[in-house]
Every structure is written in C-alpha cells, then in structure tokens.
Amino acid sequence: MTANVAMRTVRIGSRKSQLALVQTHWVQAELQKQFPHLKFEVKTMETQGDKILNVSLSKIGDKGLFTQELESDMLDGTIDFAVHSLKDLPTRLPEGLMLGCVTEREDPADALVLNAKHQGQQIDTLPENAVIGTSSLRRLAQLRHHFPNFEFKDIRGNLNTRLRKLDEGDYDAIILAVAGLRRLEMSDRIDQILPPEISLHAVGQGALGIECRSDDSEILSIVKALEHLPTACRCQAERAFLRELEGGCQVPIGVNTILVDDQLTLTGIVASLDGQRLIKDNIQGAPAEAEALGTTLAKRAKAAGAQGILDEITAASRA
Ligand SMILES: NCc1[nH]cc(CCC(=O)O)c1CC(=O)O
C-alpha cells in the first residue's frame, strides 16, 4: 500500500572502532542523500585485527586481518557491502568480491604527534634517543633510515589508546595517519605533517574503499555514486605496485602519487627493516595506464634490489 513496504534495505558492514564508524556513517549519510528511496542500515562487527592487540601487526603478518569477518558476511548475504580504510584492504580480494568504490582521499601523509614535553619540536629537532611509537614496518624502516639514533617501540590499539599511551609518557612521539586524526576531529594533535622525503605513505592511505559482491550490479551502481575518479586512479597505481611486490607477508613499502594535467606520477619505496637500504624510484604516464605503471615500477624496484629485501623478510618471517 505505502511505498515503505517495497523500500529496499541496504545493509552496510563496518568495524566497530570509532574511526571505522565515523567513516561508515559518512558513507551511509552520503548514499542516503543520493538514494532517498532506499534505506541504509549499518551492521558492526569486530574483526581479528580488533581482537588481537597483544601481538605486533608485523608478526601477525598476513593480510585481511581487518576485513575477513566482513567479507564472509558479504558472501553469505548478511551485509551488502563493507566500508574499509582502503589501506587495510588487501590487494587481492576473495573470489566473488570486488573493490566497488574508492572515495575522495584525505591528506594521505603521516603525522608526527608529540608528547607535551616536546611541544614545538619537529622530527629533526627531537633529542637523539627519542622513543618513537609505531607498529608499521613502513614507518619504522623509513624513519630508522633518516634517524638511526631514535629508539622505536611497537604501539597497538585504536587511535585513542595510542594517544593515551603517548600522553602517559610511554613514548616521546608517535606516528599516525593525518587522515584518521582529521576524521576524528583531532587535527590539533598533529605536530608535523611528515614530507614525502621522510616518509612515503601507505598504499591507499587516506581513502575509503567500499568492497561489494562482484555479481551484485545493483549494489555496485549504488556505491559507485561515491567514487572519486582522481583518487581511484592514484590508488589503482599504488595497489598495483603493492600487489606486484608482496608475497603474503608484511613488507615496508611506501608510495606517493601526483595526478595533474592528465599525468600520473607514482613514487615507490621498498625498505629493508633496519632502514639501511631504501630502493626508491618513480614512473610517469597516462592515468588510463595506472595499473601498468604500478606493476612496471614494482618490477623495476625488484630488479634494483627490492627482490633481495623481500626474500630476506620472507625468510625471517618463516624462521
Ligand atoms: N591500520 C590502522 C589504520 N587504518 C587506517 C588508518 C588511518 C586512516 C587512513 O589511513 O585512511 C589507521 C591508523 C593509522 O595508520 O594511523
């Protein structure tokens, strides 16, 4: 009788962390505006990555830690699509699922966040033996290269937990994504945005990735409404670079992309864990070639020494 009876409900899957919820609620609100005749509901769940907090991310190693539970719910139809931080979404997705949409990116850079006693400092004015908190091999290797005298300590937990540990004095500074802090309205905690010369960011950092079923064209056309083409293009190159380099274990890989005047520039780095060796190179080409640019740059990096670094890391993770 009423239109409500026939109204389709679209179920969105999300992690439960504060950042995940802010991101998912943004997607929900944007889609609701564009599709007023549909009803968007959010279903939250905890993933392995949210539960295992006592083991360092690099030791857990494998991908999909923050996505697997959401993916099985998608495959059995409990949810219709899932919203992820794109950088947490593996470059190879399970059979039957696809990356349906990449949203407009926040600043993808890393941020330096200081303990209050270092107020006004920058990364290159911190004391020599400063204790830096990060659980990312990428940040660790690059910072170790530039600042070999810092001490690096693992840090896990959601953003608020990490900031609390910093404030309690466990660290002199921590490194976090600018994007996460901005989305949680904590930009005031950013003491310095690290330039690409010091830290190339993670693949996909700052963008959201919406994952959906490959055969659900209706849902795909809905989520595509939030696609930001320049971000999608840049992230396609970044993800192709990573896909070609990774072999199942976590490797310190950083990227930077610039898209201007129909020219895409991808810079990539592969670093050894001790920060001694950095293989860094860049490539330019047409945006339509994004995928091939990423793959080509990765092959070049492998030939220039990255393969040796990857083999070492694989051997160490098996030992
Ligand atoms: N795995 C943690 C994670 N996943 C996404 C973000 C921040 C937001 C983003 O990069 O899009 C963070 C936290 C961080 O790296 O500081």
Image: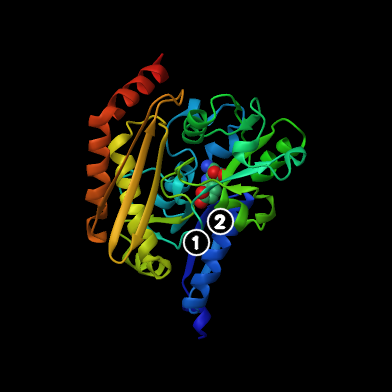
User: What residue appears at the point 75 percent right and 39 percent down from the top-left corner?
Assistant: 167
Q: Secondary structure at mark 2?
A: strand
Res 36 seen here: yes
Q: Nearer the viewer, residue 145 or 156?
A: 145
**Residue with the mark numbered 1:** 11
Whole-percent x, y for residue 131 in the image: 65, 28
Relative to 230, 73 lies left or right: right
Count the marks: how many?
2
Q: Is residue 221 above or below residue 58?
A: below
Q: Is residue 299 above or below residue 207?
A: above
**Residue with the mark numbered 2:** 43
- Tags 1 and 2 in contact by the CB under 8 Å rule? yes
Using a 10 Å C-alpha cutoff, classify the residue at mark 2 as few (fewer than 14 neighbours), some (14 to 19) or many (20 or more): some
Relative to 189, 273 lies left or right: left
Q: Is residue 170 above or below residue 226?
A: above
Q: Amino acid at mark 2?
A: Lys
Whole-percent x, y for residue 15 in the image: 56, 49
User: What residue appears at the point 65 percent right and 48 percent down from the top-left corner?
Assistant: 191
Q: Secondary structure at mark 1?
A: strand
Res 99 seen here: no
Q: Amino acid at mark 1?
A: Arg
Would you identify the image quadrant in which residue 61 lies? top left
- Most extreme residue toward the front is 125
Q: Nearer the viewer, residue 234 or 32?
A: 234
User: What residue appears at the point 71 percent right and 37 percent down from the top-left corner?
Assistant: 166
Q: Which mark is residue 155?
A: none
